[in-house]
Image (cartoon, grey):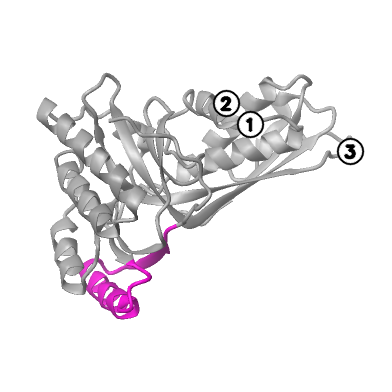
Amino acid sequence: MKSTQSTQQAGVGTAFGTFGELLQGVLPEEDGDFLVTLPVARWTRAVFRPYAGAGPGELTVRQPGKRKALRLARMIAEEAPRPVGGELSVSSVIPEGKGLASSSADLVATARAVARALGTEMPAARIERLLARIEPTDGVLYPGIVAFHHRAVRLRGTLGSLPAMAVVGIDEGGSVDTVDFNRVPKPFTTADRHRYARLLDRLARAVRTHDLAEVGRVATRSALMNQALRHKWSLDPLRDICRDVGGLGVTVGHSGTALGVLLDTADPAYTRRATAAAQACTELAGNVAVYRTLSFPNAPRRAVHV
């Protein structure tokens, strides 16, 4: 039950989602599972309203389905110097279970909201430590395109930022649980692991030089290699659509159900290409949504070692 004492100032936190990953696989090293994020302009917003004099047992979430966010809020409250309770509210426009980092965005936004309400610091290292106790996590706590060890919940490096792109996306339907997916043994060989290392090196160079065509090629290759782990029936026809409209490549939610055609929004033919892609995608899957990628021109850069 909510405390009858005065309510303290609320804290607000936000986090962006992703459209799958530009690259995801396993590197030759131990604990080499990694991904490279593709941030998009879809957001989660969390609000935490603490109640003065309440204890951690009185901490609730307005949306019953946000159990992971509630667990995280309680973990943060338990680390507070004084007992705290309150109400958490989480709202999002990121589709769930599709491989678009909805759960990660919920958790990162929650961590930021609770910390702001309590007046405590919430650096990335602390978020990583907390989230590692809950589930494998996307790298949405960092601005920019990053290489992230999602199972270990640890940053590998920041690749940088890219000019804005669009993703004309489809959804094969259904949903995928992140925790269950990451329990599946990876079928990748030692040779595959070295291929992923080369792809990461190519992608890091492409982001650094803003080579969108190379970004698309790497993303497409990653999608194809992922077929051995989670097959997507629409990948081949989507590649045909990408070729027909002159897209950069295809990107997928490696652990989800979303796929999309990458387009350069600065291309003079962008509107024509996007319209053609949307029409073809609707015929293929019966649904289509257009996402815009996010740019982070001031994102700090931390070298990616391959």
Q: Magenta span has 294?
A: no
Q: Amino acid at mark 1?
A: Met
Q: Which callout, 3 or 1, points to the residue nearer the camera?
A: 1
The secondary element bearing badge 3 is classed as: loop
Q: Is residue 256 left or right of residue 77?
A: left
Q: Which numbered disc flags the more N-terminal residue, 2 or 3?
A: 3
Quadrant in which the C terminus is drawn: top left
Viewer-proximal residue, 50 or 202? 202
Tell me if label 2 and label 1 are in contact, CB under 8 Å: yes
For this view, does 113 lie left or right of residue 98? right
Q: Dot 1: within a 10 Å radius of its alpha carbon, few (fewer than 14), some, or many (20 or more) residues? A: some
Residue 42 image position (x, y, % from top left): 49, 57
Q: Name the secondary structure under disc 2.
A: helix
Q: Which residue is mark 1?
A: 122
Residue 6 disc label = 3
Task: State the residue position of label 2.
Answer: 126
Residue at 24%, 59% (x, y): give it. 213
Q: Which residue is at a point 34% across and 79% down the rendered structure image?
A: 271
Q: Position of residue 149 (x, y in %)?
A: 37, 30
How many other residues sit within 10 Å of disc 3, few (<14), some (14-19) or many (≥20)?
few
Residue range in magenta is 264-293
